[in-house]
Image (cartoon, rainbow, N blue to C red):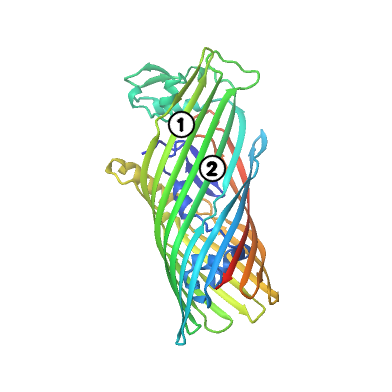
């Protein structure tokens, strides 16, 4: 089991506890249960609303009943570029802007084999697919000048704990570098000398994180009399998450201390995970113009391994010390909640179509399993936090396309997504535009979407409330996605 939470991380009302020492927390649950599939060119433009009754491979990855809507075999390939630019605002220090992080990723590689019949069951289709989730890379930083130090946090954790039992990823490093001085090693008495005169310190925080998630899928879809479409699928996922955390303190201009000059604390986390899940979907088209759909994804079973380490550099008046933790490992499981979605479509004959989609996920149903009775108290406490801090969330999407010419499709969409946190029930918008070129044996879809997240970020927290201020900032991140798909009818 890893160490305690240290970063209070609030995403647009997504208040999540993250941790420089990588303790499992609410952010781990949302990283997997709230992940969004990377959009195809068509779905980026229509904000995913086409999953109700779509004819592209994003639709098939969300709603397997869409597999049955194809009349011909297809080979589809797509790429998308995602950019994240973060502005950090610290009052009254000002605003800090990070360079945008751009990344080019595979959207999907899909092969659909269509088999047509002359009976009531019109098609029997099989889909093999490799599909990505949205995988942004993000960098943000900010600084502030105030009294107090992260050393006070370590002092609170260390009090009453034998020097031989200190956490080797935080307070153990503080003792090893003399950021904390040992008064009585057996009784757990320590002091932090330079906290006595509490000089003003400039505190700098930097975090870089990246996520890569892909999913492979085998799906089967059928078409009964052009009215009823049924599909089932099995999915296997893989995820890699990396985070580098850097926190630095040094004396502010005009300040002096005989005990302290600067410290730098580094933390690294690498997580790898695999998953299994299944989906089922149904579409009913009661006439040419109207269709309704319903789809469900089972709980996703994630098997996760975290690797983590930390390093502390501490400089006082006499010398500079460095200490590094051992490399830590922790394996655990996560069961994400069932996801339910559906919607309605209206098809204009030879003129276009419009879709309305709604999705529901109860994030309180995330369940952590630490696989050991030794960690049962921590597991029970975390699952209790999940049920109280998280909440059900809804997502609405409205999107459509028009056909000014038989070969050209113009598209646009709007999505409203609700925060998954109990203390913020707000909805946040995203918009998309795009076009498609539909030729006889070949088509290309291009879509662009944009959305914004706001978050409050606290660099660390004290286990016991303190009068020392905690460095914090308001972060605003603008995400933009450009997606291109090309498909060949076989």
**Looking at the picture, how far across and down is residue 321, in whole percent?**
48, 19
Q: Are marks 2 and 1 in contact (CB under 8 Å)?
A: no
Determine which residue is flagged by label 2. Answer: 209
The vertical placement of 48 against 153, above or below, is below
Horizontal side of 308 relative to 261 (left or right) equals: left
| Residue 332 visible in the picture | yes
Q: Residue at x 32, y 42 (%)?
A: 377
On the picture, is 311 further left or further right than 187? Answer: right
Q: Position of residue 301 (x, y in %)?
A: 38, 55
| Secondary structure state at the residue bearing disc 1 | strand
- Image location (x, y in percent) of residue 174: 44, 24
Per the model, the C-alpha gap separating discs 2 and 1 is 16 Å
Task: Name which residue lies at 33% across and 46% down.
Answer: 370
Q: Which mark is residue 244?
A: none
> Which residue in the structure is indicated by mark 1?
310
Image spot of residue 2 (x, y percent): 39, 37
Q: Residue at x 47, y 87 (%)?
A: 118
Q: Quadrant of residue 98?
A: top right
Would you call the spot at circle 1 few (<14 residues within 10 Å), some (14-19), or many (20 or more)? many
- Which quadrant would the N terminus be assigned to in this image? top left
Whichever of callouts 2 and 1 sits on the residue coming sooner in the sequence is: 2
Regarding mark 2 in the picture, which secondary structure is present there?
A: strand
Q: Is residue 100 above or below residue 38?
A: above
Q: Nearer the viewer, residue 31 or 395?
A: 31
Q: Quadrant of residue 437?
A: bottom right
Question: Quadrant location of the C terminus?
Answer: bottom right
Q: Is 274 above or below relative to 346? A: above
Q: Nearer the viewer, residue 196 or 330?
A: 330
Q: Is residue 162 visible?
A: no
């Amino acid at each position: 089991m890893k160490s305690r939470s240290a970063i209070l991380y609030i995403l647009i009302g997504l208040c999540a506890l993250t941790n420089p020492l990588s303790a499992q927390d609410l952010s781990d649950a949302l990283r997997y249960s709230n992940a969004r599939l990377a959009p195809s060119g068509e779905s980026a433009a229509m904000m995913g609303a086409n999953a109700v009754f779509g004819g592209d491979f994003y639709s098939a990855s969300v709603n397997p009943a869409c597999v049955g809507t194809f009349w011909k075999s297809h080979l589809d390939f797509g790429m998308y570029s995602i950019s994240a630019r973060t502005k950090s605002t610290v009052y009254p220090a000002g605003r800090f802007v990070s360079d945008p992080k751009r990344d080019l990723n595979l959207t999907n590689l899909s092969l659909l084999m269509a088999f047509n019949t002359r009976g009531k069951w019109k098609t029997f289709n099989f889909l093999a697919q490799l599909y990505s989730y949205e995988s942004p890379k993000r960098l943000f930083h900010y600084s502030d000048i105030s009294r107090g130090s992260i050393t006070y946090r370590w002092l609170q954790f260390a009090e009453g704990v034998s020097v031989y039992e200190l956490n080797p990823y935080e307070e153990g490093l503080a003792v090893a570098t003399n950021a904390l001085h040992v008064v009585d090693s057996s009784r757990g008495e320590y002091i932090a000398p330079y906290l006595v005169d509490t000089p003003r310190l400039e505190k700098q925080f930097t975090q870089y994180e990246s996520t890569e998630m892909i999913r492979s899928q085998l799906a089967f879809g059928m078409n009964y009399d052009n009215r009823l479409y049924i599909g089932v699928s099995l999915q296997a996922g893989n995820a890699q998450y990396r985070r580098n955390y850097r926190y630095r303190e040094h004396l502010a201009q005009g300040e002096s201390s005989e005990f302290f000059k600067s410290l730098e604390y580094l933390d690294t986390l690498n997580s790898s995970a695999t998953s299994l899940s299944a989906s089922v979907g149904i579409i009913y088209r009661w006439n040419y113009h109207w269709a309704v759909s319903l789809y469900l994804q089972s709980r996703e079973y994630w098997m996760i391994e975290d690797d983590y380490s930390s390093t502390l550099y501490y400089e006082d008046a006499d010398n500079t010390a460095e200490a590094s933790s051992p490399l830590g490992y922790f394996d655990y499981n996560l069961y994400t909640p069932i996801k339910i979605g559906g919607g309605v479509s209206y098809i204009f004959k030879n003129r276009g179509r419009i879709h309305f989609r709604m999705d529901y996920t109860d994030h309180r149903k995330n369940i952590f399993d630490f696989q050991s009775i030794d960690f049962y108290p921590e597991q029970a406490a975390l699952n209790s936090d999940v049920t109280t801090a998280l909440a059900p969330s809804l997502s609405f999407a409205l999107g459509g396309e028009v056909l000014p010419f038989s070969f050209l499709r113009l598209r646009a969409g709007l999505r409203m997504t609700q925060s998954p946190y109990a203390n913020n029930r707000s909805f946040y918008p995203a918009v998309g535009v795009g076009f498609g070129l539909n030729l006889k044996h070949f088509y290309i879809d291009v879509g662009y979407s944009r959305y914004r997240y706001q978050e409050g970020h606290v660099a660390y927290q004290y286990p016991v409330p303190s009068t020392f201020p905690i460095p914090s900032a308001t972060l605003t991140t603008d995400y933009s996605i450009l997606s291109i798909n090309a498909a060949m009818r076989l």
